[in-house]
Amino acid sequence: MPDVHFRPDAKIYDAIIIGSGAGGGMAAYELTKAGAKVLLLEAGQHYDPADPKYMTQLKWPWQSPRRGASTRYRPFGDFDAAYGGWDIEGEPYTTKNDTTFRWFRSRMLGGRTNHWGRISLRFGPDDFKRRSIDGIGEDWPISYDEVAPFYDETDRLLGVFGTNEGLRNDPDGIFLPPPKPRLHEHMLKKANKNLGITTIPSRLSILTKKINDERGVCFYCQQCGRSCMAYADFSSSSCLVNPAAKTGNLDIIYFAMAREILTDPKTGLCTGVSYIDTETLEEKSVRGNIVVLAASACESARLLLNSKSPRFPEGLANSSGVVGKYLHDSTGASRAAIVPTLFDRKRYNEDGVGGLHVYSPWWLDNKKLDFPRGYHIEYWGGFGMPSYGFGWGIDKVNGMFPDRNGNKREAGGYGAALKDDYRRFYGAYIGMAGRGEAVPREDNYCEIDPDTVDKYGIPVLRFHYKWSDYERLQAKHMHESFEKIIHELGAIPLSDKPGPENDYGLNAPGEIIHEVGTARMGSDPKKSALNKWQQAHDVKNLFVVDGAAFPSQGDKNCTWTILALSMRASRYIVEQKNAGKL
Amino acid sequence: MKRRDVLKGVGLTTLGLAGLSPQVKAAEVFDLTDGANLAEGPDKKKEPWEPYGRTKGELERDAKLFKEQFFNKHEMKTISGLVDIIIPKDTHSGSASEAGVPDFIEFMAKDQPGLQTPLRGGLVWLDAQAKRRFEKIFVDCTAAQQIEIVEDIAYPERKKPGMSQGIAFFSLMRNLTASGFWTSKAGIADLGYVGNTPNQWDGVPEEVLKQYGLE
């Protein structure tokens, strides 16, 4: 009874893509441009930052009654573009064995690409071959050289600024001009030069120059997190789904929460997708000849595990048993400081782009350290637009410094003197955050919770995740680096150095929102879910083009690699289709 | 300078809006964001709040919050007095209450219910303290009497015995007052934040680099 779910007259799409974030958007772009009739299923609503109805860019804090404070609906602040968050009503997830795992989801066209920092780093040659180098983790079935042409094309198609530095494991790209450093970034460059910490222009997917007629150029409001009305920053909805829709080959169904990938019990091939209409709670089905899964690493694993049938009793594409396993997020640790030489700074507009103008790629050799993987450092500081939280905790700071006349001040206070402290310290705070590579482990995983469903009746994920000493010692090293930098700047840290009692300040897994690895690719079908084209070993018309496919993460952010690989997999789909093999 | 003028000065093409249909829409948005057209804080006459890219769920929730009133008149009066002790009018700008901070605190207490007990309880603590010392509630005390109490709770490191809960309450009030004031139109003007407007970033001004020895 293969087609019991389908209406007899249902249209059969060439491909159904589940999810409209980086991976799904790129697949939609590539497949529709190639002439395929594509259906895109999106669990959330429509979104377009150029439509005033959705726009939060260039709003002032006083336009929000909570002055930009975060809410359950917008955990990164009231003006952030992402709809959803860590805690979505009716969409729970659970944990076991004292796991803390936090899962950020966006329910909107473009998914989480409307929110992120636009940090667009290529993985380097070593990042694809970790096991060969030191025996830890897993190699990818592909090399940097095989991905490089797709990184190049992604750079040209979507735009990224940066500089060619000739760093071996932080490859050069096709870069637009980077913005000049802000004042604190100049100071960081100088301090880090003395310390031997490489500090170079950041690499963000923001257009500092025009690249095509569909997208505008950055006007330096620092608000990429609100998503750009000129489409000058990359988001999947603005820069991939929009042009895909213009081909006329794309249909989009919103509020479609995919429940299960349907297969033909005889052939074992995908035949379509069943989803719940989140507005009516009705189950519906759509038919397609190819299914491209791009729901995010964990949602994609959940869908595969929930797509059980007599032929696929462990879930789809899971004869290896690896689906859900090897889940890993970037590591994170951070520190803030105040720079007394910046008190009473001259005011000017230094908004710049929506993120850091300089960063530090990994500058050391792990062979000489007590942890096996690297990290990069991101920096913040400057005259940000005040928002909820501004001035918070001044009683922890103002007692440390004498007043303008050199007299000792008492911490806390009130009145005119206090009011002046806020002015004096404005623009003198800086911060830094390490983002590192974790070692993927089989026993860090998500699985189907046997007892819990969400409000759509779909069994939910249960997480099991522990950091190891690889990550803890890396975080310890991050803080040692932060302290060196803060000291060299003549700055004062605003918190104590975390110790072993709290994992050296490591963020909880999931919090960096770079989770990957849950349906990894590999050459051995017994140890991987996908082949090197991100095609399921077990089901040849099923592809996974999000972070789930990553055998490892690199000390880089994952989005640019998701995009390059989704482009590569989509080209393969078209080739195979044209060759009659799909 | 009005944003519309900035827009003209920079020119739409360099703003990156060329070739986009939303050019006109964008110009309208710049007008909407012109602070001159907007109230400083929650303005009862203008409710419902000017929309700023809300989802349906957010609009419904905010409309509900605006209909509720958490603090009573007496509490609002005490809050107004306290926020002006924390951030008074000076030669640069007006006071916290003039910038709408009490209404902001009222909204936050509804938006983040975890604030309700510390704030309400803190206000009762303050009145009890005033009655014990001066046989009057806080708002009926003279300015000098109010300051006598504030001196005992505004400096955490003095650790005056019996005052720790008052210190915690005052710190919370200080934090909320600062956030409310410096995010208001008056506060942002006072602070000298001159961004949130289309511009061309061309690096740190020469004289500033020179000042810090970074040429």
Image: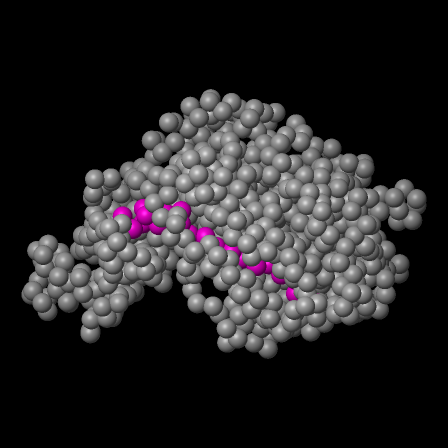
- The answer to whether residue A507 shows anywhere in this view is no
Does the magenta segment cover residue A430?
A: yes
| Picture colour scheme | one colour
Q: Is residue A56 left or right of residue A424?
A: right
Q: Which residues are magenta?
A: A420-440
Name the residue located 57 percent from the left edge and 29 percent from the top edge.
B16
Q: Nearer the viewer, residue A279 or A535?
A: A535
Name the residue located 57 percent from the left edge and 47 percent from the top edge.
A358
- Above or below residue A530? Residue B49 is above
- Above or below residue B126? Residue B67 is above
Q: Nearer the viewer, residue A117 or B191?
A: B191
Q: Position of residue A209 (x, y in %)?
A: 62, 32
Q: Nearer the viewer, residue B167 or A111?
A: B167
Q: Nearer the viewer, residue A344 or B141?
A: A344
Name the residue located 20 percent from the left edge and 71 percent from the top edge.
B160
- Above or below residue A302? Residue A451 is below
Q: Position of residue A325 (x, y in %)?
A: 71, 68
Q: Position of residue A231 (x, y in %)?
A: 59, 35
Q: Quadrant of residue A263?
A: bottom right
Q: Position of residue A115 (x, y in %)?
A: 56, 48
Does the magenta segment cover residue A62?
A: no
